[in-house]
């Protein structure tokens, strides 16, 4: 076969492959994926940020106690659903708020939003000012905890206490996306290849395997209901945009200096068997801020608050009521 003939054969094969991928992407997008209400025993709300509407849940009437603001982690399918075993119980004693960050859950997912750590730091600070309207105890997980740390440092009057579950450290948050990250970001936005990569990464199998290996020590907690919810959330229209920024490095932030400067009470909760964010990183943070406290949850990984909700809720309640008594 001539060189020209080989080229045409390659192009035709490639075209057929792209057409197949496009068809698969279209079939996934047509699926009727309705996620559960994240936190059904609560009131819905919309915070109108400058980049789009932010959906949140609110419950509780105990205005004399510090309010609690839950900030979810950053991952495919992430939303306020991850706090369902904490939100309702703690609402008995506290006003509780749980937003879906822009680009996640049921919030707006604009393709042209400048997704970055700075955007989320600004968004959380504005949410506290506009919706919570009082200094809040921020309870946050992993990269969301890094955003919360920066909010507490840069807007100290808005955060009275921090409870950080396996907060992302600089080791796991390479700072600059660089040219490679920018190129990868462009690839993820390509209509066919980008969508195909996202659909593979956010497949039901990938989500289930990630939950069993990284979220929970007890694999039985990666239930069909949980996997179905994460999958449905990850396939809401335009859900790939924020994740593309995350995978490309644009959401990375080094919160070490901010953590060292914190003057508010801060408690770290760490799963002893955490594979994503090993317990050794907790010691690094404690050296930066000797006033911080560490609570180690045995038989737990990244979602210690979900794996041991009774202990986590009791700890949160004790910390906040102690702070209130000290301030009285």
Image: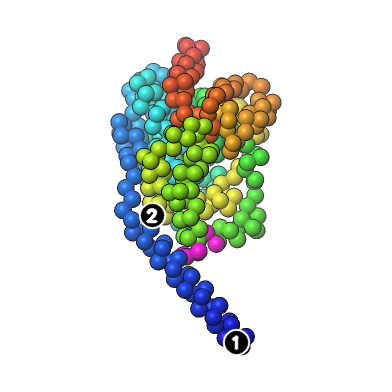
In this view, the residue farthest toward the front is: 1
In this view, the residue farthest toward the bottom is: 2
Q: Is any part of residue 293 visible from this angle?
A: yes
Find residue 114 and report its horizontal and vertical position in percent.
Answer: 51, 52
Query: Residue at label 2?
Result: 237
**Considering only vertical position in the picture, is 42 above or below 49?**
above
- Which color scheme is applied? rainbow
Number of numbered discs on residues = 2
The part of the chain drawn in magenta is 187-193
Find residue 23 and report its horizontal and vertical position in percent.
Answer: 40, 66
The span from disc 2 to disc 1 (Cα, nearest Å) is 45 Å
Q: Quadrant of the N terminus?
A: bottom right
**Considering only vertical position in the picture, is 220 above or below 2?**
above
Residue appearing at x 35%, y 21% in the figure:
92
Indicate whether residue 296 is drawn in magenta: no
Apparent side of residue 7 relative to residue 325 in the rendered image (left or right):
right
Q: Residues within 10 Å of mark 2 (few under 14, many from 20)?
A: some
Residue appearing at x 51%, y 24% in the figure:
160
Query: Residue at label 1?
Result: 1
**Considering only vertical position in the picture, is 188 above or below 15?**
above
Residue appearing at x 57%, y 33% in the figure:
274
Indicate whether residue 191 is drawn in magenta: yes
- Front in this rendered view, residue 245 or 235: 235
């Amino acid at each position: 076969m001539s060189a020209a003939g080989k080229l045409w054969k390659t192009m035709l094969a490639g075209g057929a492959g792209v057409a197949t991928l496009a068809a698969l992407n279209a079939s996934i997008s047509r699926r009727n994926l309705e996620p559960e209400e994240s936190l059904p025993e609560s009131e819905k709300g919309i915070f109108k940020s400058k980049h789009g509407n932010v959906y949140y849940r609110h419950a509780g009437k105990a205005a004399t106690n510090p309010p609690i603001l839950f900030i979810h982690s950053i991952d495919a399918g992430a939303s306020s659903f991850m706090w369902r075993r904490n939100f309702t119980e703690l609402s008995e004693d506290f006003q509780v708020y749980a937003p879906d960050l822009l680009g996640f859950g049921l919030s707006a997912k604009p393709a042209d939003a400048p997704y970055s750590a700075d955007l989320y730091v600004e968004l959380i600070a504005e949410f506290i000012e506009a919706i919570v309207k009082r200094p809040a105890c921020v309870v946050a997980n992993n990269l969301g905890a890094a955003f919360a740390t920066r909010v507490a440092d840069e807007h100290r009057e808005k955060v009275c206490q921090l409870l950080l579950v396996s907060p992302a450290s600089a080791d796991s948050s390479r700072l600059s996306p660089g040219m490679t990250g920018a190129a990868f970001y462009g690839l993820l936005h390509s209509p066919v290849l980008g969508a195909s990569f996202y659909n593979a990464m956010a497949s039901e199998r990938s989500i289930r395997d990630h939950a069993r290996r990284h979220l929970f020590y007890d694999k039985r907690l990666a239930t069909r209901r949980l996997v179905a919810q994460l999958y449905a959330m990850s396939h809401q229209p335009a859900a790939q945009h924020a994740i593309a920024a995350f995978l490309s490095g644009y959401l990375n932030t080094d919160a070490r200096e901010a953590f060292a400067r914190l003057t508010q009470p801060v408690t770290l909760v760490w799963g002893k068997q955490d594979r994503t964010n090993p317990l050794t990183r907790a010691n690094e943070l404690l050296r930066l801020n000797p006033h911080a406290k560490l609570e180690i949850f045995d038989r737990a990984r990244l979602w210690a608050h979900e794996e041991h909700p009774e202990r986590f809720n009791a700890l949160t309640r004790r910390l906040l009521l102690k702070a209130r008594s000290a301030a009285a």
